[in-house]
Image: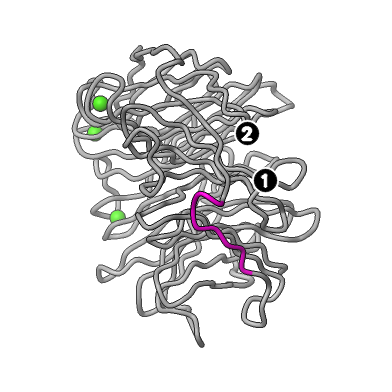
Amino acid sequence: MRRIAALIVLVLLPTSIILAMGFNGSQVYNYVQPSSTVYPNTWMLTLGGPEDDYPWWGIEVDEQGYVYTVGQSSSWRPLGYVPLVVVKASRYGENIRNIAVYGNGSFMGRNLVIVGKTIYAVGQVTGYGAGGTDGYLTAFLENSTVKFFTTIGSSALDLLWRISVGRDNTIYAVGYTMGLGAVRADTLIVKFDSDGKVLWSLIAGESQFDYSWGIATWYNSTSGKGYVIVSGQTNSFPVGGGYDCLVLKLSSEGMLEWSIVFGASELDRLEEVVVDEHGFIYVAGATYSGGIPGVLVAKISPEGQLVWITSFRGDKGDAAYSVYVDNDYVYAAGYTESYTSGELGGHDAFVALLDKNSGEVVSLTHFGGSDVEIAYGVKSDATTYMYHMYLVTLLHLLKAVETSL
Ligand SMILES: [Ca+2]
Ligand SMILES: [Ca+2]
Ligand SMILES: [Ca+2]
């Protein structure tokens, strides 16, 4: 990375400007589809109204096994604007609580983490901040108390896409900016304390478009050093052609440790990144061939060496949006048009399990109906050997699925 610059950019707003409230499922369409012969050991929760309602990348499973996702609703607009919506479900698929965070602008809820009882969410907002679309971080409780709301951005397009928790409950967020001194688009990384104060922020990129979508943290207990890893795509540093995959590793102080770019001749991009307990990095995204995407998953050593790359594709489009790692497997989730069968539709969500050491695909499960289903997030609960993923259709805010392996 030839150009990486620290900067201080923030616009702080009083927390009272935005509001939150709970609502129950009776105010929207809401149903749980129980286990069936088509999907044994599976539940599916759908929440939404007559307009478009989306979940995005965020999925969390807390210590009690409750599942949380974040998204936005066009069906339910308290002040006329799209709110951020968090949906809480039990591990059996019951809708426990829904929380809307709203104000005089539209909130896209892209990702969330839960620290103790506080829900932290990032995304992009209009009507607040420095102009146009800005990124934001907000923290709130299940009882709808907003703890803080911080925007970050410029008069141009700025957004925050994913977050990760670091040591001492620090929050790292990643997105991209087209202002703040960026050349075209540049990666934007921000570190906040647990009260939403910006500790540092930086942009990274070069002359062309540089986007980052994923972020993960890792603490090396031997050295006592913390790290943050970011994944995305760049065409400022072409190695294969078109966009190539980008991974940056920085210290918790925001100093660049290393960066790598890899890819083939067409569009290659990385979405999410996770780190295992030994500091190995797993990324998932898409690699195109003949204009058709295929699934891309890779493992990278703590020193920045590629350990393995697995890509698989059918004759139609397949891509991953999410990756997770536990003691046994790497999980990649996304959508598939190639690996569908039977009464399932032509555009289904999938979860693939890969061997951590070899990258070999151990299994692939797909799920969906006749319409479009996409898995945007995946988490596993290794203690009971279940995995959770959530899916989206055009009309449904949440479809969470739990399936035994
Ligand atoms: Ca802006
Ligand atoms: Ca750039
Ligand atoms: Ca490429």
Magenta stretch: dominant SS? strand
> Are the residues flagged by discs 1 and 2 in contact, CB closer than 8 Å?
no
Tell me the kind of residue under disc 2: Ile
- Name the residue beneath numbered marker 2: 114
Q: Is residue 285 above or below residue 281?
A: below
How would you rate the neighbour count of disc 2 (Cα within 10 Å): few for under 14, some for 14-19, many for 20 or more?
A: some
**What element does badge 1 sit on?**
strand
Highlighted magenta segment, given as a residue range: 26-33
What scheme was used to colour the molecule?
one colour
Q: Is residue 260 above or below residue 168?
A: below
Tell me the kind of residue under disc 1: Val
Q: Earlier in the sequence, mark 1 or mark 2?
A: 1
Report ligand 3 position as a quadrant.
bottom left
Q: Is residue 32 magenta?
A: yes
Quadrant in which the N terminus appears: top left
**Image side of residue 153 versus residue 405, left or right:** left
Taking the spot 62% from the left edge, 81% from the top edge, the residue there is: 38
Residue 275 placement: quadrant? top right
Taking the spot 24% from the left edge, 54% from the top edge, the residue there is: 241
Nearer-the-camera pick, 404 or 203:
404
Taking the spot 39% from the left edge, 67% from the top edge, the residue there is: 294
Image coordinates of residue 342 in percent, x first then y, are 51, 88
Mark pair 1, 2: CA separation: 9 Å
Image coordinates of residue 235 in percent, x first then y, are 25, 45
Q: Which of the numbered marks, if any, corresponds to residue 195?
A: none
Image coordinates of residue 163 in percent, x first then y, are 50, 34
Outermost front residue? 26
Q: Is residue 88 magenta?
A: no
Image coordinates of residue 351 in percent, x first then y, are 56, 65
Quadrant in which the C terminus appears: bottom right
Outermost bottom residue? 342
- Name the residue beneath numbered marker 1: 61
